[in-house]
Image (tube, rainbow, N blue to C red):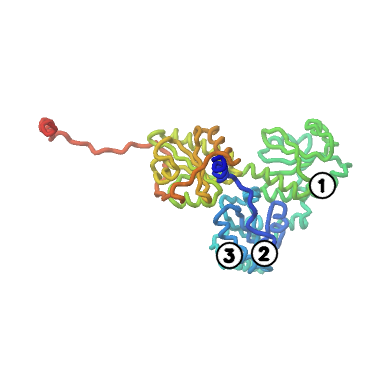
């Protein structure tokens, strides 16, 4: 029995799995450490797939993606990012589902979304069309390649991207900013500081571009601005601290190469990515796409609008939005429906017309689900999801072993419910004495 429970508990665990591509493939594996060098600084056209190893659609695409990469070898670069592992890169480019394909062409800062089919032929055709457009632009005098390489001299970075901080401007520039800051406290005579300087400069330029300026790098000459050094207890050089608005500064514990600094900055950036959308289940497409494209889909069945009114429903939705924010880095899908609107869905999850509000977490790959047993509150849902994320909690098989049929419904208009109108009955012609006789 214990072994069986262990198997069930693991069914919704976030598993550590290998990527879909290997060194023997013609698909270039990309990550925060090499993305800027390989893609952004390159003059080549790139097709980049953002995927998750557990995603069924990604697994189906993988052989076609490999075939396309082989066909385009030496012509167009084809890469892939495990966005489940490197979610900072996925968040940077607005990746909300898998697989997402982007075309990095003449303007690497504004990649285009690939909208074509998912066969190798369709991918190759789209790549060649994009390549023709790139060549045509260059013939017309428009420059291609990476803005980064032109700005930073082939990756050396631009010193202007490191903000000089002083006793006078520090509070206004850093502490009052909504941006995240990595600040180096240095001394001009320090050998380690001199070694760090080119890495810090290159990282500043890369981070500025990849986060659209949401994460910034600064530097304080602690021998000149001794007030700042004293305030933050600087005892050695270089010392790097992380500043986030309204929080105590945090010591930077990472490596001191450009790639290390950039990777940490992108992790900090991903903390500020927007939460996933909370969608009402209006059609089969909404449920299928969310549950198949995301590792887990979190579904709430809320009481009928006549039972709660708009204010009550909005309070439940607000709790869900808070939890979607708390768990946004998990990249789960979030859905809700009204009690009675999707009876087959309720039946497949064992909710069955009672106990509203209810919540279930579905793993569509396993066709397993878990039900919220505690309160429908921030505390209760957090405990439910935390248990799932570490492999605890009981699970069951989705009724029928497949996603149920979904009714197409109209979206909630945000208003209170209205009781259905009944036709008035005219009793003027009814002989009540006759009715009483009939009943007897």
Residue receiving disc 2: 26
Q: Which numbered disc covers residue 123?
A: 3
Q: Quadrant of residue 192?
A: top right
Please state, as top left, top right, bottom left or bottom right, where the C terminus lies in the image: top left
Nearer-the-camera pick, 147 or 259 = 259
Mark 1 in CB contact with mark 3 (< 8 angstroms): no
Indicate the secondary structure of the residue bearing disc 1.
helix
Q: Which numbered disc covers residue 197?
A: 1
* Residue 140 visible in the picture: no
Indicate the secondary structure of the residue bearing disc 2.
loop
Q: Which residue is painted at 56% across and 59% down in the image? A: 60
Indicate the secondary structure of the residue bearing disc 3.
helix
Residue 143 at x, y percent in the picture: 69, 63
Residue 412 at x, y percent in the picture: 42, 42
Q: Which residue is painted at 18% across and 36% down in the image? A: 426
Q: Which residue is painted at 48% across and 34% down in the image? A: 315
> Which mark is first along the chain, 3 or 2?
2
- Callout in the foreground (2, 1): 2
Residue 309 at x, y percent in the picture: 41, 34
Q: CA distance from mark 1 to mark 3?
A: 42 Å
Please state, as top left, top right, bottom left or bottom right, where the N terminus lies in the image: top right
Task: Report the number of numbered marks.
Answer: 3
Left/right of residue 9 with respect to residue 167 in the rendered view: left
Q: CA distance from mark 2 to mark 1?
A: 36 Å
Tell me if mark 1 has few (under 14), some (14-19) or many (20+) residues whose alpha carbon lies within 10 angstroms of its own: some
Left/right of residue 231 with respect to residue 344 in the rendered view: right
Residue located farthest toward the right when viewing the structure as drawn: 189
Tell me if mark 3 has few (under 14), some (14-19) or many (20+) residues whose alpha carbon lies within 10 angstroms of its own: many
Nearer-the-camera pick, 35 or 287 = 287
- Callout in the foreground (1, 3): 3
Q: Which residue is painted at 78% across and 47% down in the image? A: 200
């Amino acid at each position: 029995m214990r072994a069986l429970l262990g198997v069930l508990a693991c069914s919704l665990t976030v598993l550590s799995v290998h990527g879909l591509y290997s060194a023997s493939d013609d698909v270039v594996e990309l990550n925060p450490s090499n993305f800027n060098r390989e893609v952004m600084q390159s003059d080549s056209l790139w097709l980049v797939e953002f995927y998750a190893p557990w995603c069924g659609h990604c697994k189906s695409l993988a052989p076609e993606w490999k075939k396309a990469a082989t066909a385009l070898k030496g012509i167009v670069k084809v890469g892939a990012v495990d966005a489940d592992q490197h979610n900072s890169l996925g968040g940077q480019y607005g990746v909300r589902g898998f697989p997402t394909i982007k075309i990095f062409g003449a303007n690497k800062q504004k990649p285009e979304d690939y909208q074509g089919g998912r066969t190798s032929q369709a991918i190759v055709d789209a790549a060649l069309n994009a390549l023709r457009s790139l060549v045509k632009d260059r013939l017309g005098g428009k420059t291609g390649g990476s803005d980064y390489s032109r700005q930073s001299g082939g990756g050396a970075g631009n010193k202007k991207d490191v903000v000089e901080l002083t006793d006078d401007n520090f509070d206004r520039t850093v502490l009052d900013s909504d941006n995240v800051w990595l600040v180096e406290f240095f001394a001009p005579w320090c050998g380690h500081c001199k070694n760090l300087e080119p890495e810090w400069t290159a990282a500043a330029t890369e981070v500025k571009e990849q986060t659209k300026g949401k994460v910034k790098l600064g530097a304080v000459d602690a021998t000149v601005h001794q007030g700042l050094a004293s305030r933050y207890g600087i005892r050695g050089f270089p010392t790097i601290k992380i500043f986030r608005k309204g929080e105590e500064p945090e010591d930077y514990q990472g490596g001191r190469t450009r790639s290390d600094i950039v990777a940490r900055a992108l992790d900090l950036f991903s903390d500020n990515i927007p939460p996933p959308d909370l969608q009402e289940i209006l059609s089969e497409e909404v449920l299928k796409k969310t549950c198949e494209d995301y590792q887990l889909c979190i579904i709430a069945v809320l009481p009928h609008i006549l039972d709660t009114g708009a204010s009550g429903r909005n309070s439940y939705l607000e709790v869900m939005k808070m939890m979607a924010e708390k768990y946004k880095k998990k990249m789960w899908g979030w859905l809700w429906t009204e009690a009675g609107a999707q009876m087959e869905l309720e039946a497949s999850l064992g909710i069955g017309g009672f106990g509203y509000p209810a919540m279930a977490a579905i793993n569509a790959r396993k066709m397993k689900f878990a039900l919220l047993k505690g309160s429908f509150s921030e505390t209760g849902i957090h405990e439910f999801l935390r248990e799932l994320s570490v492999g605890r909690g009981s699970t069951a098989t989705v009724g029928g072993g497949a996603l149920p049929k979904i009714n197409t419904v109209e979206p909630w208009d945000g208003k209170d419910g209205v009781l259905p109108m009944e036709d008035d009955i005219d009793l003027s012609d009814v002989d009540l004495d006759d009715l009483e006789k009939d009943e007897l």
